[in-house]
Image (spheres, rainbow, N blue to C red):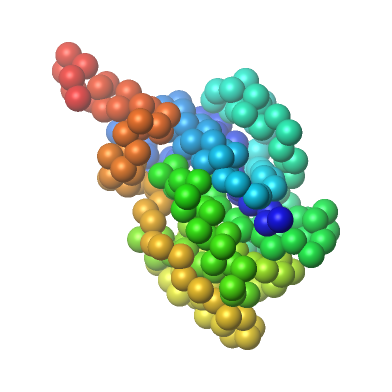
Amino acid sequence: MTVLLVVAKAPVPGAVKTRLCPPATAAQAARIAAAALRDTLDAVRATPGVTPVLSCAGRLTEAEDAAELTAALVGWPVLEQRGVGLGDRLANAYAEVAAAYPGRPVLQIGMDTPQVTPARLATAVRRLRAADAVLGRARDGGWWSLGLRDPRHATVLRAVRMSTPDTGRDTWGALTGRGLHTAPLPMLRDVDEWPDALAVAIEVPGGRFARQVAAVRRTLVPGGRR
């Protein structure tokens, strides 16, 4: 059974989605992040045949919607992220999962793609069965998902510069350079800046994420109109 690893940051005002500010306030940005995380958790929970795990930076007890997030994570193993940079933290999360679930493949996603669906995740899990690795690139040059049949190969991430326009390309090169047969996943848009939030909210108009984006939009228009 594949481990579906969600790597996230506790949605604490001032610590997450700061590039949404302005137009969002720090508290509004944190509520958007909390909604994105909850929508992502729902998608993972509805994906058949996976074991969900959360790797989190920061304290969920200090987050927006802390009670709802805690309830949504009942039954989930929650790991604390360790390491200096993002590549280091990702590699450490994979290593912890590999130790806890020996022999299991790992598909990792973040909290920045609330448009992800159970069907899309199930397809990624199936594609990983036929490859050593799968990588879903993001439109900003990064990536939204990485799957490894042997999660110990995630050590390559320590040498990849994260959060750059070349991160997706460099990650692909690191995987193939290690001799791994790597298959692509569909490209998605990460939510980093306000135009991303607007575009993704249109993709999933019925989710919590879209409702929080709409709440910010209403504060920007006189009379509360969208």
Q: Is residue 197 left or right of residue 226?
A: right
From this viewpoint, which residue is outermost toward the top? Answer: 223
What residue is at 21 percent from the left and 16 percent from the top? 224
From the image, which quarter does the C terminus lie in? top left
Question: What percent of the width, then of the height, locates residue 37?
Answer: 52, 37
Front one among 180 and 120: 120
Front one among 100 and 33: 100
Using the rendered view, name the quadrant where residue 69 is placed.
top right
Measured along the vertical axis of the image, is residue 128 above or below residue 96? below
From the image, which quarter does the N terminus lie in? bottom right
Question: What percent of the width, then of the height, locates residue 24?
Answer: 35, 31
Question: What percent of the width, then of the height, locates residue 14?
Answer: 50, 34
Measured along the vertical axis of the image, is residue 90 above or below residue 19? below
What residue is at 39 percent from the left and 62 percent from the top? 187
Using the rendered view, name the quadrant where residue 169 is placed.
bottom left
Using the rendered view, name the quadrant where residue 189 is placed.
bottom left
What residue is at 46 percent from the left and 28 percent from the top? 31
Q: How many marks?
A: 0
Measured along the vertical axis of the image, is residue 27 above or below residue 146? above
Question: What percent of the width, then of the height, locates residue 120?
Answer: 46, 53
Q: Is residue 18 left or right of residue 75?
A: left
Residue 15 visible in the picture: no
What residue is at 67 percent from the left and 68 percent from the top? 149
Residue 148 visible in the picture: yes
